[in-house]
Amino acid sequence: MLGRHGGRTAALGLLACALFAPTASAGSLPQLGLGAPQLESSECTPGSPAGCQRIRYAYGPVTVRPGGDLQLVAKDLQKPMYDGYISRLTANLYRADGTVPPVDVIHLHHGAWVSNPTYGNFPIFFAAGEEKTHLQIPQGYGLRIGGSDAWSMTYMLHNLTPRAEDVYVTYDLDYTAAEQAESQGIKKVLPLWLDVMNNTSPISVFNVQRGFGHFDKKYKRKVCAYPKERCADFTPFGLSQPGNGVGWDWTVPARDDGTIVAMAGHMHPGGLEDQVSLVHGNAAKRVFTSEAKYWDSTGPVSWDMSMTLTPADWRVRLKAGDRIRLNAVYDSQQSSWYSDMGIVMAFVAPGDSSGVDVFSPGAKLATTGAVTHGHLAENDNHGGSNARPLPGGKGPLTSRIKIANYIYSPGDLSTPAAIPRVRANKKLTFFNEDNKDLVWHTITTCASPCTASTGIAYPLANALPTLDSLEMGNASPQLGDLSHLQPASGQVAFSITPGKAGLHPGRTYTYFCRIHPFMRGAFKVVK
């Protein structure tokens, strides 16, 4: 979500520049929610302040281009016009007809809501991804907003199809006017944005490759904890991705001396848990583990999951000078996972001393929570059925495979043509010949035959040896100052010498595009 240049300070500056630069869109210029689906009820969560009202705002309609995968910015978002307190935030994606699109068709990869002036330790005060966590602030507390504040949103809408779609991004608030809330003694909280990438790279994504990490007794599988461990050979930009042996630490400033009242994590498929510890001197204590609970029977392989939120009575005392430590744990046994995130949103009540001091003798604190929702209907299509055998016959020799109109040529598995052959000791190059400024592709190996139906859990980057091209394409010149937010590699071609890459003569290798997983291809290595 953040900038690509040197550290947190630079990232803040770049984000601020982006938010007040000309608005980018995924297609036609959006309107502010005209025609968006409305709430069925304005009732707030039980326990909300008297006078609370649930309000829905929407951004759109946004036309998401075929294959769209762009990081964009929406300015001048709608919001309450008067000072008040927010006690609950949720987000979703809707089609123009009011239905929620299936996640394997189009989804809100992430949205991050930003305020000017900044409320907490970072411009972002609320974020949501396709796991759709509901952020609930406990009874008696609220996030104070001003009627004159300006809101913006960085967002990524992922269209996994070659067809355009019109959608709305909705965001629902439980909101109480300031005078009413304060007359009831509500306490102000500030948002804390905690991201494992803030100290190692100015962009919030990392990779976890199959085979890295350690065996974990809790999950009975191999996992990797980033940034404590080295979890991949390379970052989403092809750079080295070392671990630091500890995790990411954020030092608590005097302003945030108080009590953390709530937190919840955000992860991508393959994610298992966000581990949050409090560090005082040389002592570290786990204060919460935001777990990914998968409703998918095949395990941690898809968006069919929910993250856990702290219990309603959970409180942690936060003291200036202490550090909050964060690690994101991902599966590294079943598959490789690219462009991952490990983020926690928390809310702190400054000056509040009611929280548990976890370093005091005999201190007790629940470090697990409960999910904020169950299985969602939009996650029904897991895929993986009706696998077809690979085509037979002797395909042509080639050293070039082009990608055009979402087809690998030669070698696309949507056709019955024989699989092309490539020389083990000669360079093989893939070219992105689609709109490389707006549509990116990858070459990512998957277990053969890799021909089953597409869904949110299929295909996976589960082949050995692991091969991934990064995202082939340029950061869009149409985005101007936003180009640094794009995960594109800047390269429109990807080359390997199969023998040097560990691909053996006589074997056939299948691959897919992890941005557009309906795309499948194959080649056979020969001497």
Image (cartoon, helix red, strand yellow):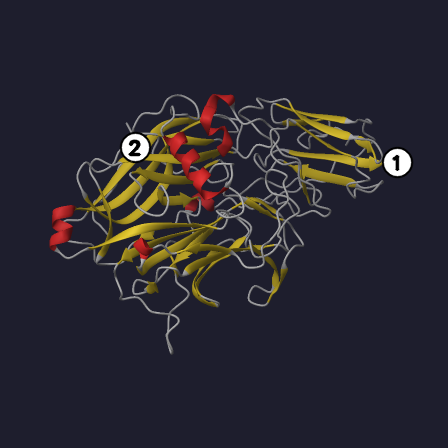
Q: Is residue 239 left or right of residue 503?
A: left
Quadrant of the drawing holding the C terminus:
top right
Label 2: how many Cα within 10 Å (few below 14, some 14–19, many 20+): some
Q: Residue furthest bottom?
A: 362
Question: Which amino acid type is shown beneath numbered disc 1?
Answer: Lys
**Residue 342, percent across and down?**
49, 50
Query: Disc 2 residue type?
Result: Leu
Position of 320 relative to 165 (above/below): below
Residue 46 in view (yes/no):
no
What is the secondary structure assignment of the residue under circle 2?
Answer: loop
Residue behind mark 1: 527
Question: Which secondary structure, mark 1?
Answer: loop
Foreground of the two, 110 or 179:
179
Whole-percent x, y for residue 334 in the image: 63, 53
Read off the residue under disc 2: 77
Q: Nearer the viewer, residue 443 or 194?
A: 194
Q: Residue at x 46, y 45 (%)?
A: 379
* Mark with earlier residue (2, 1): 2
Q: In this rendered view, identify the residue nearer to me: 228 or 464.
A: 228
Question: Residue 45, position in %: x, y?
Answer: 24, 53
Q: Position of residue 241 (x, y in %)?
A: 61, 47
Task: Evaluate if marks 2 and 1 touch, with contact meaning CB atoms under 8 Å apart.
Answer: no
In-image side of 202 versus 177 (left or right): right
Q: Is residue 516 left or right of residue 24?
A: right
Residue drawn at (26%, 37%), measured in percent from left and top? 38
Quadrant of the image occupied by residue 155:
top left
Mark yes or no: residue 230 visible.
yes
Left or right of residue 67: residue 193: left
Of the pair 472 and 99, the residue shown nearer to us? 472
